[in-house]
Image (cartoon, coloured by chain):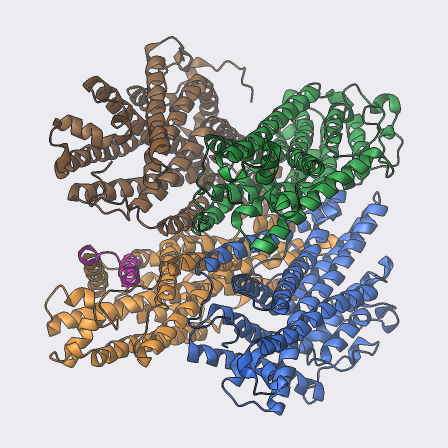
Chain colours: A brown, B orange, C blue, D green
């Protein structure tokens, strides 16, 4: 709506705009080659730029290339040794992170548009006051998710090291060589080991892991910010309920603006949401299937349970944060239905119709809308698939006692 | 709505308020450490109190602790002997009852708020007359459910005793020792048997069993009371149909109030409903899977079929009672659609929109709403899961002829 | 609506009322102990009576008792020889037909009420003209379904006879004895064979088979008659579209009346529909599973494919006829949406709201509404269940070459 | 609406009517015995005729007969050698193409009606300008789909030839004989090989393959043309939003007309859509199951992966193009909700209600509507079925090392 109007600069950037509270999340991502934008720390959203010829873009390309190469090695391994269900995890992990990284570049290119829409909405909702706690919330969530992810990655490394000591047949190699051969079997069975290759592989792995977690975090934080706006409208509805038509007109227009913003954001997030859900669902299946595997060391057991628990928690968190928007967007209904008849007016009727007719929420490329009931459906589908996977029985490679040493 | 208004005491407590007809159910629960409230037998709802420092709260804590310890023993057994599908039943039973018991304390803390909302609604619906038969209905349902549950528990004890006589290798122990070792294998394989331990274990078991049945009963009774209010509105709609706008305004406002009450109650019941459905669904799967087990004594056969039948009946009963609210809340539509055009007014249109836009009902933390079609979906999902469980085949422990003697 | 008004006899019974066109279907059923009513051939619906003390009621009781005894024998066989999936078919067949026969008595008792509601609707819709072809349609459908059912039963008998000749070890018995021992193994393995027992068993079997087909036929015919009424309204809507408000008021009221009638009929049919769908779905699963069985004679192969094809066709027919009501009830929407604005009025808006808010159709005890998309869901569920059943593999009884001779 | 009005010829056929841009697609089909119509290249839609006595109709009959005979051979093979899951693909392929070819004749007979409705809509929407790029779009899509299909068929032929060289036991026959015996085992195991038979078989196969791809292409192109019309309305809505009631009336009527056209087209396409989806879903299951088969030559591997990828891509394309209509038809909602209150009028309210009440889209005989969420459901169902198929394990024919040589 009225996208061409030049927003009044003094009003458009209130003290805690979305841009300000969210920018540090993007800056954080840039350390790992995600969202290659310049000017994030500047107050004015018009300084936010995407530059094709820049180090950040190059770094993002490295992210993409890394995931691509790792994925290619995994597929190569399939071509050589046949499809193995427990190896499908890493493959899909790299392929989907490759897609995710590409999507983040596309998003970065369009980010200034998103910010413009957002600031228009913020300007129109000045009266509600800014969501002051949002910045702290963003920081806490980022810290929690990323710390947990770091712990998982450290366990992954620790697991590979322990495995090296556990299996005797690697005794001639140096310690780090053993680690890399065990952690990235699909790579170092094909090409020769050398330290600089190992560095690039490890970097690609770290960046992919961060991209994976960052995608989920990104969806959570955006959902959070959008839901908070609906929550503001609901709070205003609840506090001064009985009022003249002008009030309802305002409320309805604000509601429409936030709903419109959700749609704009959804259009840009669509691919990321689909990638995130597909990735999580697929990984859940693979991890559940891996529960049948015999774990040889305690570190492996801890790694398995921690990584599985983290995965489940993160998937649920993404869904619930995404569903929060839909939840909040339906809450005005209760208040609107209870307006006494003398204050009831066309505006209220329109708003009720709008809430009913056009469900608001983050969707996975419009294939599904994230709601609470969707979580239940997804869970039941994953369990169904899983029970069938489990019937293929544990993967037994003939002639190996501890399956992990034979890569 | 208008929560701060001090209700007129002479009107707020009509002869058969919800508080009065329901209080005995809560008192019954208190014998088993559920809903630790004081002042339930008093007429005035303001006397209902939750006290942190009180015997009842302490007893409720024992309930929680008991379920927790028993659950911990079950998990310990898994850690020692590996995961066994037929043992997953007791484990989830204790864990979910632990959650349930905690939830009941949370609910007890908020119970006075629920009662206040309820009495507000009752006050506004004085004209409809109180639901006189509700108290008797509550009593009958409580008696029926609890008697059936008692019979199940006695069969459980009887089964363990018979098993003791059936298996020869316990002949050196005393009769009660055999019972406890067979009934609670996860406990007395780990710690030494002694009478006082046995007492606490048996008490924890009885309390957990009651909590389990009480959760379902609680949901049924609450649903029943809420549905009865919608039924009153429907009855009034059917008897004096053709009337002026003021009548419709009244009806609509009453409907809104009951719908609002359902939402308030739903918010407080949410966790309990989720726990109840998850517990029942999981137990149904485990029990169906156990149908493959070879039953060695007639008592075991009777116990199995009785306990399974009771479980199915209770699950269906909870769902149908829960769905009753949704059913009744949609019934006004038929009358509203058939109002002759000369009496049709804004109020009727608003009510039709409200019924359509905001489905009313008890939900499982908003993941699902309990409706009749939900029962069908749940049944089909359970059957699907079950057919896949059954394909894992009966659990055969090598070297045992009668599987039950080897614990 | 206005149930107490005494309908004007000269108008209430137009030449082809539902009562008249449907009565012969009920008379047909009475030959097999279904719908024990008196006065069906009389024109006046007030002559239709249900008599407790009458031969027809007694015969209906024989129907119930027969299905009950046969079901009991089947269960007894399970108790003696263990649960066998391929024998679950006959058992559920008798148990569900027992329920069906009981339901038909309940329906017979309430039939006069249904007829009263129906004649009220017919009276109000006199202007539309009676559905003259309905009687012929009823007759054709009854003939087709019952002829196909007869063919199936003859194949069943022929199959049992052929089986007798195929298996040598029955050579000492007389031909009919062999038939009965092969056709009703659950009975004549338990009790001694004697001609009069065989007569009652065969009679019970024939009546149960008819009840089974009659249930589906009944639902089809009723659905057909109801859908035809909606079709009449749609036809009138399409022919004289552009008209004054009074026309829309009439149309809306007629629509409401038919919708109300559907609800009344649905309430009385609810149990029958549930039984029918459960029976068909269960039988489909069992029959698909039986496809794995080795068929020893050509007659058996023909019997199997014919009976399976008939079952599938009948299930689809019941669903499509049931869904027809829902289809027709939504059709006015297209016309209503295309009314030019100058003729648009409150009545049209109300009708649109009504069609949207209250879906009309035959439901299975409100657990599901019969629609076209329900057929798809049911098919997908049955296929899912079936694929899992098939994984249990064909039922092989050790020591038997042709599985059928060993009963 | 107003079907009898004779359209003004100078206006009814604007430069790029649907008839003109689509006719070449039909002409293309006629080379393969599909849509036997005369007068497709003429500008006037009244020249489009279906002739019973014509070469094109005869050719279409050959198409039907060919698919029928091939299907009969496949069924015959089942009857002789038993049901084999991997052979179910060709059978269903021919049977469904037989149905498809019949449907195309039915559609050809009704095509002039469809064109009439379409030109009425085009006439009424003259103001929007014609969709100039539609003809190019149709051409590109036809070329892409058909080239990919050609590549698949060439690979199929190449595969059969390579197989012939791979298997030694065919060395006595000539090269083309080997090809035909390997490519059409169900035919030439039953009847003797001779060149003229081979010609008819190959022709029938080519035509069936084209029919299969043409069905999907047809649905895509039609959906595309319909969605483009909704897109035009949406574009007009977005550009001149704030306007008087007359504008809204026009928009609403245009929307209604396109929605009506969709319904008319859907009625005629219904069977084709159902056939297409069933065919694709079934083939996907069979192809996924065939992934277990051991592929003996590289050509076979390439053929398998190419044909599988093409199948998946085509199925997704059909669904997404079909869902596009539904997507576009819901888009006006956003604009309509954001109309400022001063311009809000009855017309807008009606349009919102219409969009809500009557979902627009291509349906599979009303069993399902093609939407984006349907794609997700279909995918999840196919995966579920597939996982169960896979559990039956790979099809091993005893005594054969390379399964393909033994036909």
* Magenta run includes residue B92: yes
Displayed quadrant of residue D64: top right
Residue drawn at x 44%, y 27% as measured from the top left: A127
Bounds of the magenta segment: B78-102
Q: Main secondary structure of the magenta part?
A: helix
Displayed quadrant of residue C219: bottom right
* Magenta run includes residue B97: yes
Report x, y in % for residue A397.
Answer: 28, 44
Q: Nearer the viewer, residue B307 or D321?
A: D321
Q: Nearer the viewer, residue A258 or C404?
A: C404
- In the rendered image, the vertical position of residue A358 relative to residue C73, given as above or below: above
- Count all numbered tags in the image, as a single digit: 0
- Quadrant into which the N terminus of chain D falls: top right
Q: Residue furthest toward the front?
A: D172
- Quadrant into which the C terminus of chain D falls: top right
Would you say B223 lies left or right of C66 here?
Answer: left
Report x, y in % for residue A315.
Answer: 36, 40
Report x, y in % for residue D210.
Answer: 66, 33
Any part of residue B387 in sight:
yes
- In the rendered image, the vertical position of residue D364 relative to residue B269, given as above or below: above
């Amino acid at each position: 709506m009225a996208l061409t109007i030049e927003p009044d600069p003094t009003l458009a950037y209130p003290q805690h705009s979305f841009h300000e509270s969210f920018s540090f999340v993007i800056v954080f991502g840039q350390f790992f080659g995600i969202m290659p934008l310049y000017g994030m720390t500047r107050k004015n959203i018009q300084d936010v730029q995407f530059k094709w010829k820049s180090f950040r873009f190059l770094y993002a390309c490295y992210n993409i290339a890394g995931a691509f190469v790792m994925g290619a090695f995994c597929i190569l391994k399939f071509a050589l040794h046949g499809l193995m269900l427990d190896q499908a995890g890493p493959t899909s992990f790299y392929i989907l992170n490759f897609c995710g990284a590409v999507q983040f570049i596309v998003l970065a290119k369009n980010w200034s548009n998103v910010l413009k829409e957002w600031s228009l909405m913020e300007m129109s909702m000045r009266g509600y006051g800014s969501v002051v706690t949002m910045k702290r919330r963003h920081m806490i969530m980022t810290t929690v998710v990323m710390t947990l992810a770091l712990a998982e990655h450290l366990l992954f490394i620790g697991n590979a090291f322990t495995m090296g000591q556990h299996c005797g047949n690697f005794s001639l190699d140096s310690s780090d060589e053993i680690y890399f051969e065990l952690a990235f079997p699909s790579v170092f069975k094909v090409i020769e080991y050398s330290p600089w290759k190992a560095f690039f592989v490890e970097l690609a792995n770290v960046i992919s892991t961060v991209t994976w977690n960052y995608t989920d975090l990104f969806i959570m934080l955006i959902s959070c910010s959008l839901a908070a706006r609906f929550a503001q409208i609901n709070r205003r509805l609840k506090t001064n309920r009985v009022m003249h038509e002008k009030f309802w007109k305002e409320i309805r227009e604000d509601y429409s603006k936030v709903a419109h913003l959700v749609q704009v954001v959804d259009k840009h997030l669509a691919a990321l949401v689909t990638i995130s859900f597909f990735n999580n669902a697929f990984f859940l299946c693979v991890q559940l299937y891996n529960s049948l595997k015999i774990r040889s060391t305690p570190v492996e057991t801890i790694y398995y349970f921690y990584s599985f628990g983290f995965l489940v928690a993160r998937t649920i968190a993404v869904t619930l944060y995404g569903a929060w928007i839909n939840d909040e967007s339906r809450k005005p209904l209760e208040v609107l239905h209870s307006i006494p008849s003398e204050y009831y007016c066309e505006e209220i009727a329109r708003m009720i119709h709008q809430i009913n007719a056009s469900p608001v929420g983050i969707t996975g490329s419009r294939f599904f809308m994230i709601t609470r009931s969707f979580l239940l459906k997804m869970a039941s589908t994953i369990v169904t698939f899983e029970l069938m996977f489990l019937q293929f029985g544990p993967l037994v490679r003939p002639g190996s006692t501890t399956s992990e040493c034979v890569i």
